[in-house]
Image (tube, grey):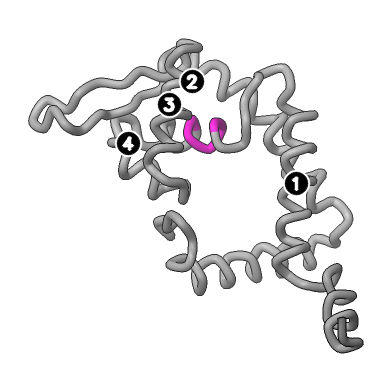
Amino acid sequence: MSASTKTRAAGLFTRPGFMVRRLHQIYVSIYLQECAAFGTTPVQSSVMQVLLLTPGIDQAALAAEIGVDRTTTSNVLARLEKRGLVRREADAEDKRLRRAFLTEQGEAMLAEMQDALDRAHGRLVAPLSPDERDAFARSLRVLVEANNDEGRSALRML
């Protein structure tokens, strides 16, 4: 192996992709600690939050709202539905479409989860000053917007 290859490999810990993956792992761990009482994943809570904001959204649109593929969205909805947190209905006009709604139980649980979600996000960025947090959030948004089409599933940007 050449010295150049070893030198480049040594840069692993400064590479954005590696660090983003590691940061995601850390966030999931923090999320699971803060939200353990609710037995949800970050994707499940994202689905529930979108359903609170847009009740009756169809599964394909829901997938785009959170930037995951339709199969994953369908699986997440099935798990939430089994727990009584979500209900799905066939669209009245197009039976191929399934619309999703939070149940009363889902709405209540999501309301209870908000403090835990806020703590999880807060813990992730706590080492940064308020100005650094704002700059970090802006930088993340720029990167996501600029590279959104490169992902497996595009996120509908607001």
- Kindly indicate the quadrant of the structure image that contains residue 44: top right
SS category of the residue bearing label 4: helix
Q: What type is the residue that disc 3 sits on?
A: Leu
Query: Whole-Å distance between the Cαs marked 2 and 3?
Result: 5 Å
Q: Nearer the viewer, residue 21 or 156?
A: 21
Q: Position of residue 52 (x, y in %)?
A: 43, 31
Q: Which residue is pictured at 42% across the width and 46% down the height?
A: 69
- Tell me what residue is drawn at x 75 percent, y 44 percent: 27
> CA separation, marks 4 and 2?
14 Å
Q: Circle 2 is placed at which residue position?
A: 79
* Main SS class of the magenta portion in the image: helix
* Residue named by callout 3: 77
User: In this figure, which residue is indicated by the disc labeled 4?
Assistant: 59
Label 1 – label 3 distance at C-alpha? 23 Å
Secondary element at tag 3: helix
Q: Which residues are magenta?
A: 44-48
- Where residue 5 sits, quadrant-wise, is bottom right
Find out whether the residues at labels 2 and 3 contact each other: C-beta distance under 8 Å.
Answer: yes
Q: Which mark is residue 25?
A: 1
Q: Residues within 10 Å of mark 1 (few under 14, many from 20)?
A: few
Residue at 29% in and 30% down: 56
Q: Which SS class for mark 1?
A: helix
